[in-house]
């Protein structure tokens, strides 16, 4: 996949992140691509659902599974604005996603290079190709702006 295509799909993931931000969720978005077509989309819904498992990647994987009528996403590519956490990395491994592209690193919970690299650990029965830093500045800026705005609102209340 050429860089222009990576940026196109990451911009689609950023669109999903914006959908999360609009409803007050942490702005993380994800798309899953199969044969050049987006077959799964997701954005965080943890706060609205009060369900810890409703991360952008999980929702996109579920939609892609339904589209293909299969739990196996072996030829798929996942684009996500923030480095996946342990739960999402596990779902990526279990669904056999071939390639993962992420924007911003997550030094507190990222398991695709920051804290560890689950997706390329040979002890698992599946590994994924990983490309980090796709539209990194834009992805990181969404998160920084979101949390800065939250801190400002909290200070105004005091």
Image (spheres, helix red, strand yellow):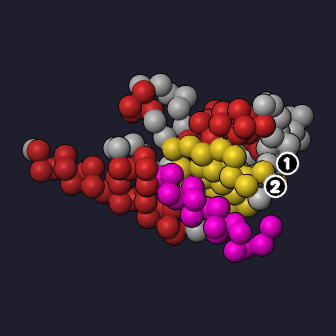
Quadrant including the N terminus = bottom right
Dot 2 alpha-carbon crowd within 10 angstroms: few under 14, some 14 to 19, many 20 or more: few
SS label for mark 2: loop
Tell me the residue at 69%/74% (across/down).
4
**Picture quadrant where residue 37 is located:** bottom right
> Which one is earlier in the sequence, the residue at label 2 or at label 1?
2
- Label 2 – label 1 distance at C-alpha: 8 Å
Q: Do tag 2 and tag 1 residues touch (Cβ < 8 Å)?
A: yes
Q: Position of residue 125 (x, y in %)?
A: 89, 34
SS label for mark 1: loop
Tell me the residue at 63%/50% (across/down).
31
Tell me the residue at 54%/37% (across/down).
55
Q: Position of residue 145 (x, y in %)?
A: 35, 60
Dot 1 alpha-carbon crowd within 10 angstroms: few under 14, some 14 to 19, many 20 or more: few
Tell me the residue at 50%/57% (across/down).
15
Quadrant including the C terminus = top left
* Residue marked by disc 2: 35
Q: How many marks?
A: 2
Of residues 151 and 6, the one nearer the viewer is 6
Q: Is residue 121 above or below residue 35?
A: above
Main secondary structure of the magenta stretch? helix
Q: Position of residue 36 (x, y in %)?
A: 77, 59
Of residues 59 and 115, the one nearer the viewer is 59
Q: Is residue 30 magenta?
A: no
Instruction: Determine whether, in the image, residue 28 is placed left or right of residue 87.
Output: left
Question: Is residue 2 among what the camera can see?
Answer: yes
Q: Position of residue 88 (x, y in %)?
A: 65, 37
Question: Is residue 110 among what the camera can see?
Answer: no
Which stretch appears magenta? 1-17
Q: Which mark is residue 75?
A: 1
């Amino acid at each position: 996949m050429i860089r222009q295509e990576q940026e196109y799909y990451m911009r689609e993931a950023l669109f999903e992140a914006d959908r999360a931000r609009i409803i007050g969720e942490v702005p993380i978005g994800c798309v899953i691509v199969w044969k050049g077509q987006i077959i799964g989309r997701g954005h965080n819904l943890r706060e609205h659902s009060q369900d810890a498992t409703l991360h952008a990647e999980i929702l996109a994987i579920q939609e892609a599974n339904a589209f293909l009528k299969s739990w196996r996403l072996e030829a798929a590519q996942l684009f996500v604005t923030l480095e996946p956490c342990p739960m999402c990395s596990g779902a990526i491994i279990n669904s056999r996603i071939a390639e993962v592209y992420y924007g911003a690193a997550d030094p507190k919970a990222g398991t695709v290079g920051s804290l560890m690299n689950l997706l390329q650990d040979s002890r698992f029965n599946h590994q994924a190709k990983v490309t980090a830093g796709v539209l990194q500045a834009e992805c990181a800026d969404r998160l920084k702006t979101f949390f800065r705005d939250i801190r400002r609102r909290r200070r105004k209340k005091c």
